[in-house]
Amino acid sequence: MPTAPPWDAVVEGGPDAPSLAVRGRDGAGTPLVLLHGLGGTLEEWEPVAGLLAARHPVYTYDLRGHGHSADGDWTVEGCVADLGRVVERFGMRAPVVAGYGFGGVVSALFATRRADLTAAVSVDGHCWPRAGVVAERLGIGFEQAAANTAVARAFLVDHLVATCSPMPAEVFDRLVASYRTGASGLPGAVVEATALRGSVRDDRLVSLRPGPRAVRAITADLAAYDLHRLTADPRVPSLTMVAHGAFPPLPGAPALLPAIMAAQAAHELAAPSPNRTPKRLDAPHPAHMTSPEAVTEAIEAFLAGLARE
């Protein structure tokens, strides 16, 4: 089915609300808003957005401090408020909010506060691994699990900080060229577009948004939340998708990192609630980029099931 071409717009900001860069696709049906992960841009949802647009209006936007959106205070609450501004700006009625990673956390929190949504969807938005879950799943003592989980968290934050750190332009250009060939194991065109949208070139240096300080600020704020408790009981039907495929290899990663992440993923799949449906995706991470058809099909099937109820 032919879909309308995408268009770009800006949600204007104010003193405590940065302007947000939005991409929309017009259509009929229930509107969907798609949120990217920490360090990404709206480009990472393009494969899914193009598929969903056959049956829905679809909106993606750059989170504050990412892509073409303006900087703002790096707080979880600020990001949740931004989602509300996008919904209100385009007059969406009963939208579906969906996100990957940190975007999934934002959509899940939004779903605990708004009863006027059709549904919420999270793709691998289950936050940091918890020591108790790791201890139980791996059959190790709590103190050992807590120590290993802390090491894994610190490594992941440091890795993202390094990824978002400024670099010489020629290094960035080589990195983008490697993305283009699919060397990362991800769809080359999508990763390239994401990297270019999130970069700022100044003389011979390329700065990558949101930058190291912002990454540390948002991950520190995120750690202050008991998100597992806060998001356990959404006010609207919620779909939690957990990719079961292999994680991309990260040089220097702690030996237990894959097992720790797998333990938390298994816990998410085993913890349904009256308004929360977990679903396993047999797809490599990040699933919305590696397996857009599977993610789209899961969202459509979930919404079709709600319509039949």
Image (cartoon, helix red, strand yellow):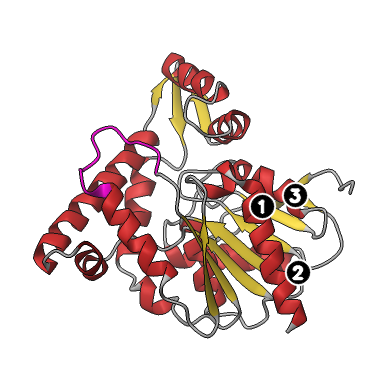
Sequence-wise, the earlier of marks 1 and 2 is 1
Residue 277 shows in the view = yes
Residue under label 3: 51
Which kind of residue does numbered mark 2 sit on? Met
Residue under label 2: 92
Q: Residue at x 79, y 53 (%)?
A: 53
Q: Nearer the viewer, residue 64 or 273?
A: 273
Labelled disc at residue 60:
1
Magenta range is 247-257
x, y percent for residue 36: 55, 51
Sequence-wise, the earlier of marks 3 and 1 is 3
Q: Distance of mark 3 from mark 1, alpha carbons?
A: 13 Å
Mark 3 vs mark 2: give the one in front.
3
Q: Residue at x 46, y 44 (%)?
A: 39
Q: Is residue 175 left or right of residue 236?
A: left
x, y percent for residue 290: 56, 42
Q: Distance of mark 3 from mark 2, alpha carbons?
A: 20 Å
Sequence-wise, the earlier of marks 3 and 2 is 3
Q: Is residue 254 magenta?
A: yes
Residue 269: name its quadrant.
bottom left
Q: Is residue 95 above or below residue 286?
A: below
Contact (Cβ within 8 Å) of mark 3 with mark 2? no
Which kind of residue does numbered mark 3 sit on? Leu
Answer few, some or many: residues within 10 Å of disc 3's Cα (few below 14, many 20 plus, some between 14 and 19): some
Q: Is residue 3 left or right of residue 216?
A: right
Which kind of residue does numbered mark 1 sit on? Thr
